Amino acid sequence: MPWSSTPETVGTAPDAPGRAARRRQQAAARPADAPRWAAPWLGMLALVLALQIGLAVRLLRSNTAFSDEALYLYAGHDEIAHLLHGAVIGNYQTYFSGAPTIYPVLGAMADSVGGLLAARLLGLAFMLGATVLLYDAAGRLFDRRTGLLAAALFVVAGPTQFLSAFATYDPMALFLLVLAGWLAVRAAGSVPWLLASGLALALSDATKYAAALWDPVVLALAVLPAVERYRWRGALLRGAVLLAELVLLLGGAVLLAGHWYQSGIESTTLKRAVGTTPRLRIMDESWHWVGLIWVGALLALVLLLAERQRHRRLVAAVLVLAVMLAPINQARIQVTTSLHKHVDFGAWFAAVLAGYLLSRLLATAKGRAPLWQGAAVAAIVGFALYCGLGQVGSLYQRGWPDATGMVAALRGQLRPGEPILAENDPVPRYYLRAQTTWQQWTSTWNFSYRDPVTHRTYSGDAAYQKAIEAHYFGVVELDHVTTPGLDVKIVAAMMATPGYRKAAGVSGVHQGVDYSVWVYRPKAAATSSGH
């Protein structure tokens, strides 16, 4: 059973006699007639990828843009306009949890070609790449059958299905992270592969700052599988090289990026505000998303405890730990935001061991009729698919409202340069970007207003009320869900201010959201009162 990558001679020290004998035994045990990329295995991997595509296709057009999708794509268009034409844009780097110049720009390029669908297809491409890398990484660490089963388990997981049809920086960051992990495994005999792993890891961290949580896992994959070839001293030296490269790349990038990026990294990742969600609830939710893969990985670790090679047991322990990093971190800060996405980062690593467990189950069929073992494995994968479909269904049932009607109602009321107050404003701002500028939009989350007469500055609820009394907003869109308490005050202020009228009400498809669109049209109000 192969453990490290295929033998290479680049940069290797002369073998000791014992080490050479072990390598000859491993080569003899390795099935030379059916490499990982032989036609039969490639065909089965293609079936797994086809399943992943099929699961994603049903979601790609299932709803309008989620607020995060809309925000990042809009920001990407802004960043492109800034880079090409020097346009003035918002300080996205101060509150984005990833560099706005990486995925948002790439996503906006796809959006320019084919809209939201193309941006989501880009996410699918990244997730397909992650599946292929899982197949090969697991095949290098164990065997090709493990790789195939690991890929199948990863594909059917609910978080993977969701990210395969999602246009945020999560799929890209996940792909870059696992690319770094694959390169680290592949680098067992080559320094260039090791350096490439460090570059991919730095790009992953920059794409989504929270991806740095799994940096130690990639470092472990660079060190532990190399122990057999280089002993501990040589393997640790490789880890030190990778760590030094990562620190140099990320440190240099942060220094060059400047104060605003540093502020964004601190506020969104390093010093994130602590929530109030009970820690047991977070762990329970995590179990809901990746519990099956975690159990499989844990059972595989138990099997591997019988291994004589300690570094092999350590790798297995690291892979089990990887799937727990996101739940532990979010339990620490007591927030569930993006938990269903973050757990998929660790699930990729743990799927290696879960696939190994199923492979061992099939291996027990040697010399006997393998029907029951094959049926058991098929049943486990089928059950995982059933659970994954239920997980994605629950996400979309309690997901986000269809914004089609709301955007259409807003589009009919817009006037050039007129200030717009919109609840959850990234969504209409994204769809109406051809008719508006970012300076026109205000959300119900944060706003300050300076009275042009008294020159007094208001904040909080009072800012919205004073702005409405001064007829500042020409159009107001509310969903009565995001900030319901403030909405009541805004509606009361508009009803008490002459000139404001309700232009349209649109019911959302999900969550029973009732959008309302108000406009300030004093002439229309005067005509109505004259009749």
Image (cartoon, rainbow, N blue to C red):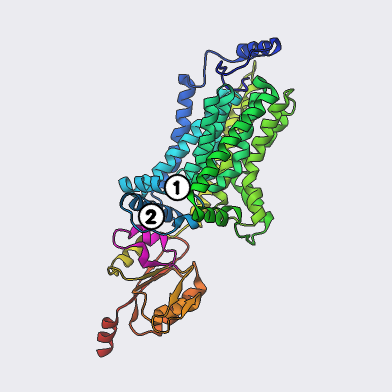
The magenta-colored residue range is: 423-443
Which image quarter holds the C terminus?
Answer: bottom left
Which image quarter holds the N terminus?
Answer: top right
Q: How many marks?
A: 2
Q: Quadrant of residue 433?
A: bottom left
Looking at the rendered structure, which numbered label has been put on residue 381? none
Reply above or below: 519 against 317: below
- Amino acid type of the residue that numbered disc 1 sits on in the rendered structure: Phe
Judging depth in this view, the residue of 444 and 145 nearest the camera is 444
The residue singled out by tag 2 in the image is 74
278 displayed left or right of 9: right
Mark 2 or 1 closer to N-term? 2
Q: Quadrant of residue 279?
A: bottom right
Q: Position of residue 430 (x, y in %)?
A: 37, 57
Q: Position of residue 190 (x, y in %)?
A: 55, 23
The residue singled out by tag 1 in the image is 166
- Amino acid type of the residue that numbered disc 2 sits on in the rendered structure: Tyr
> Does the magenta portion include 439?
yes
> Does the magenta portion include 416?
no
